[in-house]
């Protein structure tokens, strides 16, 4: 069998969830959207079933899968509904929609629903992606509070630069949030993973950790709280062939890499069809038998090549780790012009194996 696989450590997932709880001291929605960032939403939700205060997903399709699997916790729909026709199911399954634009307010006004909803009302505190402006927010909040269709209201906002504490942007957004919600009752939710880890003053009543659950840091620098995260995914494979070539020889498609010395190259069963980034540059770190070496040449669909010249003990059958313990996915991502989130979400053909 082809040796490429993603090993998912569910005890690491629980460890990371507990870290989010411990740091925030409040309720935490486990964000399992996009198939739990490629880790398998149903498996991850099952692993957290006894302790998660709730889940967050991006759409009703994802929420219904969790309900069908028997999860009874609150489930927040981070973008609410996309079509008014979803409101019946949202109501029936007691899903908690975010309302973030005027079209949704109209939908709610016109909807005929069986019981009032728990609504998360989104404030645009400065990211300018979703949410109502600070000027209109208190007014809309009071309208909804008075509506017979709303049972409970939670104020939610989202930070654009919580992973860059030096920019001052999060303090500004926090100020905007505090002003726009001052005097409004109800719970608050502001923090993604970077907020949980680095912004204790913003924790509010509900936090929304995503990437940290999967053990990857949202920061591009060594952040002390993030040091306690444990990677959930090990993306592993093996060396399936070895060959020796001379100096000055090109390697792979487009001859992107040329050897500078006589080289021993290892062929690895992992490619962009598995989700490994095709844009990874020469020199992208890879672990072979636990030792760091480098990707050389372009990543192919099913294979990639690593330099084994300085690892004489490694060869055919050697263990290869593309990311996981010992090699943070974020570091690999930075060599491919992206972030760990996208690497995880792009996982494709590679089979996932679970470990309790
Ligand atoms: C995806 C998402 C999160 C989780 O973000 P991470 O950076 O992965 O922790 C939190 N809140 C909202 C609104 C999101 O869309």
Image (tube, helix red, strand yellow):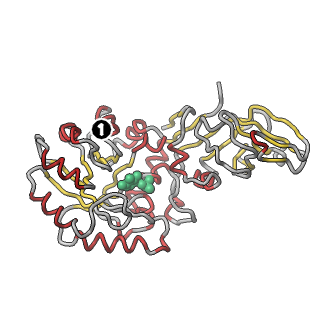
Q: Is residue 18 visible?
A: no
At x 57%, y 53%, the residue is 338
Q: Is residue 65 visible?
A: yes
At x 65%, y 54%, the residue is 335
Q: Would you place residue 326 above or below residue 251 in this image?
A: below
User: How dense is the environment of label 1, judged by Cα within 10 Å: few (below 14), some, or many (20 and up)?
Assistant: some
* For residue 271, side relative to residue 189 (left or right): right
On the image, the x and y values in percent for residue 296 come to: 76, 46
* For residue 3, side relative to residue 26 (left or right): right
- Residue under pointer 1: 71
Q: For the N terminus, which image quadrant?
A: top right
Camera-side residue of 332 and 205: 332
* For residue 68, side relative to residue 3 (left or right): left
* For residue 118, side relative to residue 127 (left or right): left
Q: Would you place residue 322 above or below residue 124 in this image?
A: above
On the image, the x and y values in percent for residue 133 come to: 27, 66
At x 30%, y 32%, the residue is 68
Asked which quadrant contains residue 49, the reply is top left
């Amino acid at each position: 069998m082809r040796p490429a696989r993603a090993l998912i450590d569910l005890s690491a997932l629980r460890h990371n969830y507990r870290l989010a709880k411990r740091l925030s001291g409040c309720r935490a929605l486990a964000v399992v959207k996009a198939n739990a960032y490629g880790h398998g939403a149903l498996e991850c939700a099952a692993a957290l079933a006894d302790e998660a205060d709730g889940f967050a997903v991006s759409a009703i399709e994802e929420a219904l899968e969790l309900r069908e699997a028997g999860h009874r916790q609150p489930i927040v729909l981070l973008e609410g509904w996309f079509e008014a026709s979803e409101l019946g199911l949202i109501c029936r399954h007691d899903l908690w929609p975010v309302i973030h634009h005027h079209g949704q307010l109209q939908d709610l006004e016109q909807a005929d629903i069986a019981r009032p909803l728990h609504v998360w009302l989104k404030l645009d505190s400065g990211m300018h992606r979703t949410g109502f402006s600070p000027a209109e927010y208190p007014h809309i909040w009071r309208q909804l509070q008075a509506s017979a269709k709303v049972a409970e209201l939670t104020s939610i906002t989202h930070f654009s630069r919580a992973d860059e504490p030096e920019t001052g942007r999060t303090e500004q957004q926090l100020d905007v949030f505090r002003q726009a919600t001052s005097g409004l009752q109800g719970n608050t939710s502001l923090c993604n993973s970077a907020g949980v880890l680095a912004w204790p003053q913003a924790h509010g009543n509900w936090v929304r950790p995503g990437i940290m659950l999967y053990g990857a840091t949202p920061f591009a620098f060594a952040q002390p709280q993030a040091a306690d995260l444990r990677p959930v995914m090990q993306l592993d494979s093996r060396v399936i062939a070895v060959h020796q070539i001379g100096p000055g020889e090109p390697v792979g498609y487009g001859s992107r890499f040329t050897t500078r010395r006589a080289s021993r190259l290892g062929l690895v069963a992992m490619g962009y069809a598995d989700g490994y980034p095709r844009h990874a540059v020469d020199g992208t770190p890879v672990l072979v038998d636990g030792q760091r070496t480098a990707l050389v040449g372009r990543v192919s669909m099913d294979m990639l090549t690593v330099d084994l010249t300085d690892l004489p003990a490694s060869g055919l059958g050697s263990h290869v780790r593309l990311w996981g313990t010992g090699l943070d996915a974020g570091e690999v991502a930075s060599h491919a012009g992206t972030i760990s989130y996208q690497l995880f979400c792009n996982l494709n053909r590679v089979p996932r194996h679970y470990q309790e």
